[in-house]
Amino acid sequence: MKFDILKNTPLYEALSERGKRIYLPEGIFYWTGRAKKEAEYIGTIGAAYAYEKDFLSGNSVNWVPCYLEYINDYFNNLDINDLVPYASVSGLEELRTIWKEWIIKKSLFKINTEEEKLLKLEKYTSLPIITAGVTNAIFMSSAMLLNPSESIICPNKRWGNYDNIFTKFLGVNIQSFEFFVDNKLNLEGLKEAIYKVVETQNKIILILGFPNNPTGFIPSWEENAQLIEILKETQKEISRPLVILIDDAYEPYIFSKNVVNRSLFYDVQQLDENIIPIKLDGITKELLLYGGRIGFVTIGLKPKWVNNDKELEILKSEIDNKLSGFNRSSISNCNHFYQAVTTKIFKEKGMDNIIKTRSIIQDMLKLRFEKINSELKKIKNPNISVDPNGGGFFVFLNLNPSKIKARTFADHLLRKYKVGVIPIENLNENINGIRIAYCSIDINQIPEIINRINLALNDFN
Ligand SMILES: Cc1ncc(COP(=O)(O)O)c(C=O)c1O
């Protein structure tokens, strides 16, 4: 948007630098809006959708956002005290405690063989603070760490909203690195980015999250071990704090057998080095409650920072106070209703039951993941490549920029073949491709969608 009228008003003159800088990029909304009007097949929507009969008993053929079957039980069954009053600034104490237990459960550390790791995780992890969704968790933690003009390191293939939060809102630079080399995590590129930033900055702030949006990438065990090694080595050499914001929005959606089966948070939290993990997660995708807007910020702490347990407790309350200050000064506190609903689900259904109920949806998405990858493999075209992917909601198809520009391709695909996808074209960062959201495509449609993409590709030969 050009703001032609706004720019000529005294209101514009009165805007702050941030007010002048910020705008809502139309990319995703533009393509999603067009797909809704023009497409027969829609692969733009980043939320899990399915026919109700495919994840719930019964035979409703409504195409709906996937949800946990008992969710409806909680919407008319709450005490007035769970609805009307303010929730506390840092979030309902009970839910915070439950979420910490949930984080411990998600570690998959085994009590009989990994007890030490479990104890360390339990003891040296802050109590999660509740935020307005994962977006707000990303915003709050990056605002806490970065001054304007400082840099945050991000992969070039990243969620577009990072650019809004870091660059447009906070005025922070993104030090981007090429995510993949030869279809593997580009660890050298990451290391170079760290060395570049350290020239001008006394700390390194990095954001990573697997499964990644838009590629669905999750590192293999080997890549993960190498990543940890590189972080350790680099942190030792630069001897400055290295903070990793770990965007776990898609945490439970791991479909490939050959990739790491838990968040990066857990390995980094165990390290003694000053490599500090900040876990950003939420009910949005984990409990399939996108509109609930409940997220969490949880920080991994290091034993060497304190002399005894008393200091550790004080440290935790100091961190709590700092994060609460961010809540109080921005959103004040989060939606009480959804905090109460989430608390009740955990208390009444229990974690194992939640995991079991959700697994029906995960299994359905896994089948789509396998289908779309196998269909994409059938396309023989030298001008495309699919980024490595092991889960999440999307796959990313790279297009050779000298032959096909992503936006032109997406427009052609939509006009001629009635398939809607999201193009991401940023040649400065070496990105030119389309994101296909298989989370919202029925499995039976996948072959036809890929067939139409293939036909559209042939039109560019
Ligand atoms: C990588 C990533 N992080 C965070 C979010 C935002 O999550 P929330 O809706 O909880 O703010 C999304 C949503 O699409 C995402 O793709």
Image: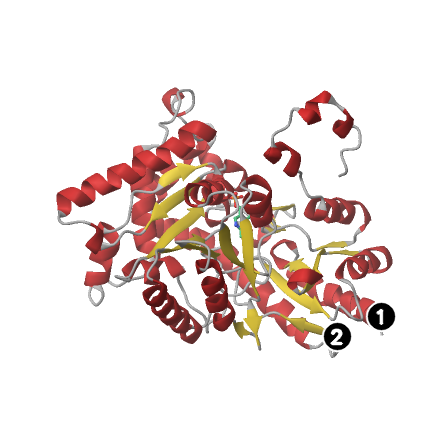
Tell me where residue 220 appears, x and y as whole percent.
45, 72
Tell me where residue 333 appears, x and y as whole percent.
42, 29
Q: Is residue 297 left or right of residue 168?
A: left
Ligand 1 closer than 8 Å to the CB at disc 1? no
Vertical order, 390 against 81 (above or below): below
Classed neighbour count for the residue bearing mark 1: other residues with Cα under 10 Å, few (<14), some (14–19), many (≥20): few
Name which residue lies at 19% across and 62% down.
116
The quadrant in which the C terminus is found is bottom right
Q: Dots 2 and 1: beta carbons under 8 Å?
A: yes
Query: In this view of the protein, which residue sits in the foreground, 111 or 297?
Result: 297
Query: In this view of the protein, which residue sits in the foreground, 264 or 425?
Result: 425
Give the label on residue 460, or none.
1
What's the residue type where badge 2 is placed? Asn
Classed neighbour count for the residue bearing mark 2: other residues with Cα under 10 Å, few (<14), some (14–19), many (≥20): some
Q: Which residue is mark 2?
A: 383
- Name the element at disc 2: loop
Residue furthest toward the front?
200
Vertical order, 132 against 245 (above or below): above
Q: Is residue 126 left or right of residue 188?
A: left
Q: How many marks?
A: 2
Vertical order, 304 against 232 (above or below): above
Q: Earlier in the sequence, mark 2 or mark 1?
A: 2
Query: In this view of the protein, which residue sits in the foreground, 166 or 47?
Result: 166
The quadrant in which the N terminus is found is top right
Query: In this view of the protein, which residue sits in the foreground, 202 or 259?
Result: 202
What's the residue type where badge 1 is placed? Phe
Name which residue lies at 78% across and 53% down.
40
* Alpha carbon separation for disc pair 2 and 1: 10 Å
Tell me where residue 327 appears, x and y as whole percent.
42, 32
Does residue 449 appear in the picture of this structure? Answer: yes
